[in-house]
Image (spheres, rainbow, N blue to C red):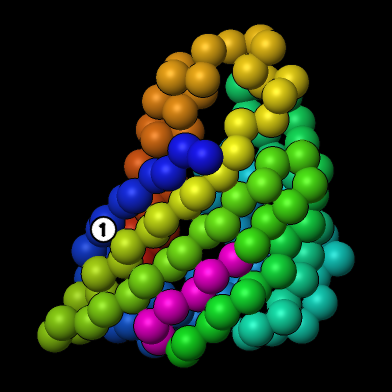
Amino acid sequence: MPRIHKRVEINAPVEKVYSYIEELRKYPEWITNLLEVKDVKGSGVGAHYTWTWKMAGMKFKGEATNIEDIPNKRVVVKSKGGIDATWEFKLETHKNVTTLDLDIDYSIPVQVLGKNAEKLIHQNNDRDADMTIMNLKDRFES
């Protein structure tokens, strides 16, 4: 299972960054290749939604659930369906600057492997994760 790790410093209080990460309906605004979030139910641990994702030019659908949620510290989202993945957001604060670590463990769907090489897909996903954390940073610093 491929893994992606990204870290970014955001010039904003941790409470604001955490609150924004908790706004599931806004995920497509900053998570690259997440096309749609629907049917959002609940908040915190147990929050659940369906999604549409684009990988290697193909669309996949699935659902996700927050399996861990520690305010201003950590959010873990487990996703299953077209792409199985776990997203972990870890937040730390230092003098009004938030450090966000994003770890993504995911599987590459078999349909994609038949179309492209796994290494190329992982490189594209790594680049997209860079764009995702920069999109989040830009939400607070622009």
Q: Main secondary structure of the magenta part?
A: strand
Tell me if residue 83 can be seen.
Answer: yes
Would residue 67 appear left or right of 14 to someone viewing this image? right
Q: Kindly identify which residue carries mark 1.
A: 8
Residue at the image position 64 percent from the left and 73 percent from the top:
66
**What stretch of residues is rendered in magenta?**
72-77
**73, 137: nearer the viewer:** 73
Tell me if residue 129 can be seen.
Answer: no
Would residue 42 appear left or right of 77 to someone viewing this image? right
Would residue 88 appear left or right of 99 to someone viewing this image? right
Query: Which residue is situated farthest in the left direction here?
Result: 95
- Where disc 1 sits, the SS reads strand
- Amino acid type at image mark 1: Val
Residue at the image position 74 percent from the left and 20 percent from the top:
111
Q: Where is residue 123, by image quadrant?
A: top left
Residue at the image position 31 percent from the left and 66 percent from the top:
100
